[in-house]
């Protein structure tokens, strides 16, 4: 079944409340996905410090402190780490490609689950509300966040299989539903040199979108092309460092509701996740139309 929530803040006065508001939304979706959860936050000064690249990891084969020490030695500049077990966040004044490459050389068993200048991705198995509070999500700040509660249908219950899937710099995709032709698209992407980290169908969608964006396509066009190529029933929320987008399949049987005010844009699988947002009583509330791409950009 799965639950999706996302919040894009327009009013800077709300930035300190991003984590608090996102946690409240996530709490309402726990019964839709009790297996595992993941979240992505854009702009938190602790999780993604200004002036540094952040890389998010699972399956770290050593302690966070030891990995930071080894990476500092390997790259010749300071690398810091935040231990949010089972996720580890690494920070350094390197490009994303440089820090990811250093991680893979130093800790080849670790799994990169997110990377970018302003993005922190956190994942775990278990009750979503418990995970969010264990990570410290209620205290997080920033301008944008997405979260997902998972009821596994296509692959095993693991932290790696939880959403969001973040496979391009600063990009995240969360998904309610299933892609019925994901195997054929996976094979085609592999023929084009795309590598995969899991057997999850959602990763195929994320890799497809990331490939289009890497080739210079904008987010709206990438999601329109996804609608043409992918079969199945799905609602997607896709975020980048400056964009927040929602799209559904042609049948649109997977629930979604959007609320928009001058201060924020929010999306959730059900209205109850939006009901406590500030000023929701003045919001424009609507259900996204089938195959229409809705995009909001950071000003």
Image: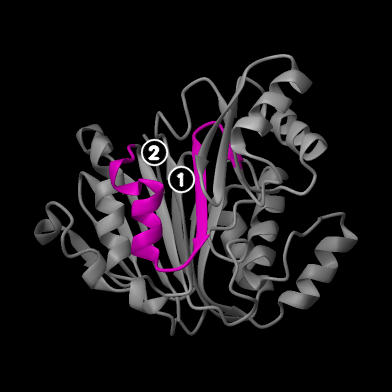
The structure's colour scheme is one colour
Q: Nearer the viewer, residue 161 or 186?
A: 161
- Could you tell me which residue is drawn at 48 percent across and 85 percent down? 251
Q: Is residue 238 left or right of residue 26?
A: right
Q: Secondary structure at mark 2?
A: loop
Q: Nearer the viewer, residue 178 or 248?
A: 178
**What is the span of residues highlighted in magenta in the rendered image?**
115-141
The answer to whether residue 293 shows anywhere in this view is: no
Name the outermost residue toward the right: 191
- Could you tell me which residue is drawn at 26 percent across and 66 percent down? 273
Q: Residue 243: horizontal and vertical position, in percent?
A: 46, 45
**Residue occupied by mark 2:** 298
Labelled pair 1, 2 in contact (Cβ < 8 Å)? yes
Quadrant assignment, res 105: top right
Q: Secondary structure at mark 1?
A: strand
Q: Residue 227: horizontal and vertical position, in percent?
A: 60, 70
Q: Residues within 10 Å of mark 1 (few under 14, many from 20)?
A: some
Q: Residue 117: horizontal and vertical position, in percent?
A: 55, 31
């Amino acid at each position: 079944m799965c639950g999706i929530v996302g919040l894009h803040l327009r009013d800077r006065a709300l930035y300190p409340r991003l984590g608090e508001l996102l946690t409240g939304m996530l709490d309402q979706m726990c019964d839709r996905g009790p297996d595992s959860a993941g979240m992505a936050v854009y702009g938190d000064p602790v999780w993604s410090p200004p002036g540094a690249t952040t890389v998010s990891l699972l399956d770290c084969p050593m302690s966070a402190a030891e990995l930071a020490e080894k990476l500092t030695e390997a790259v010749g500049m300071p690398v810091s780490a935040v231990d949010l077990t089972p996720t580890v966040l690494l920070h350094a004044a390197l490009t994303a490609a440089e820090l990811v490459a250093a991680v893979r050389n130093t800790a080849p068993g670790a799994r990169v689950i997110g990377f970018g200048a302003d993005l922190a991705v956190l994942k775990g198995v278990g009750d979503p509300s418990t995970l969010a509070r264990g990570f410290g999500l209620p205290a997080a700040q920033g301008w944008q966040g997405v979260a997902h509660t998972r009821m596994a249908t296509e692959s095993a219950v693991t932290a790696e299989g939880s959403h969001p899937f973040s496979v391009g710099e600063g990009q995240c995709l969360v998904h309610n539903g299933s892609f019925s032709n994901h195997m054929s698209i996976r094979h085609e992407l592999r023929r084009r040199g795309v590598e995969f980290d899991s057997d999850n169908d959602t990763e195929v969608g994320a890799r497809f979108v990331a490939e289009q964006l890497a080739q210079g396509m904008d987010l709206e066009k990438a999601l329109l092309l996804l609608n043409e190529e992918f079969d199945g029933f799905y609602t997607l929320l896709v975020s980048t460092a400056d964009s927040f987008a929602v799209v559904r399949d042609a049948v649109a049987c997977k629930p979604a509701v959007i609320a928009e005010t001058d201060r924020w844009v929010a999306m959730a699988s059900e209205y109850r996740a939006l009901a406590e947002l500030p000023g929701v009583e003045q919001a424009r509330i609507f259900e996204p139309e089938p195959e229409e791409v809705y995009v909001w950009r950071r000003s």
